[in-house]
Image: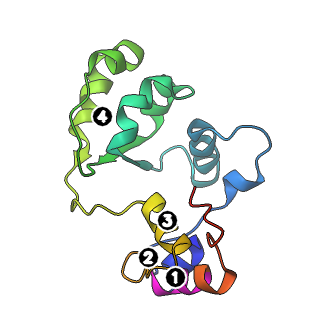
Amino acid sequence: MTRLAVEGDPLFEVSDVELHRTGPSYTFDTVEQFQSVLGPSTELFWIIGADSLPDLPSWYRIGDLVQRVSIITARRPGFHWPDIAPLAAVVGDAYAERLLAQCCETPEIDISSTAIRLRAAQERPIRYLVQDGVANYILNEGLYRRGDAR
């Protein structure tokens, strides 16, 4: 579905490197793999939703990760600035402030994958919520129809 979502747009590329990894798949490992392919001087950006920002202190090797990649946080509806103290305790004040400075304003469109799956399970339209190719795939494959909207 990700490939269908970006089909025909040369600005996007889909990577499946995490699917081929055995065991847990950590962001740090993925960044390390991209750096080994692209070279250590390549600047990498990791985009997360604002709901993930408070969880960063618990991420695997977050202290190393913030040194290797710029984490960009996209604000979502209902976003509230988290307490910086837990993050600063793990990554240091300078990196915590950088993480907060790299929060970007995004259109606050209240669309979630959970809501899309629920609509599909209820056989309600999902057009305009996902790319046409993705909507057709979900419909043709009968995804989420059994009420399993997880």
Circle 4 crowding by C-alpha within 10 Å: few under 14, some 14–19, many from 20: many
Question: In which image quadrant can residue 19 be found?
Answer: bottom right
Q: Which residues are magenta?
A: 130-137
The residue singled out by tag 2 in the image is 130
* Viewer-nearest residue: 33 or 80: 80
Q: Is residue 1 left or right of residue 43?
A: right
Q: Which mark is residue 118?
A: 3
From the top left corner, tell me how far across and down residue 32 is, in percent. 61, 41
Residue at (23% x, 58% y) in the render: 106
Helix, strand or loop at mark 3: helix
Query: Which amino acid type corresponds to the residue marked 4 in the rendered image?
Result: Leu
Crowding near the residue tagged with mark 1, few <14, some 14–19, many ≥20 C-alpha atoms within 10 Å: many
Assign a secondary structure to mark 2: loop
Q: Are marks 2 and 1 in contact (CB under 8 Å)?
A: yes
Question: Which residue sits at x=39%, y=75%?
Answer: 129
Q: Position of residue 10 (x, y in %)?
A: 46, 80
Can you tell which mark lies on residue 150?
none
Q: Earlier in the sequence, mark 2 or mark 4?
A: 4
Q: Earlier in the sequence, mark 1 or mark 4?
A: 4
The question of residue 135 being in magenta is answered with: yes
- Of the numbered discs 4 and 3, the one sitting upstream in the chain is 4
Q: Which residue is mark 1?
A: 135
* Position of 80 relative to 30 (above/below): above
3D distance between C-alphas at marks 4 and 3: 33 Å
Dot 2 amino acid type: Val
Q: Nearer the viewer, residue 145 or 32?
A: 145
Give the CA separation, mark 2 to mark 4.
29 Å
Q: Residue at horizontal 61%, vertical 45%?
A: 30
How crowded is the residue under tag 2: few (<14 C-alpha within 10 Å), some, or many (20+)? some
Q: Are marks 2 and 4 in contact (CB under 8 Å)?
A: no
CA–CA distance in space, label 2 to label 1: 6 Å
Task: Tell me which amino acid carries mark 1.
Answer: Ala
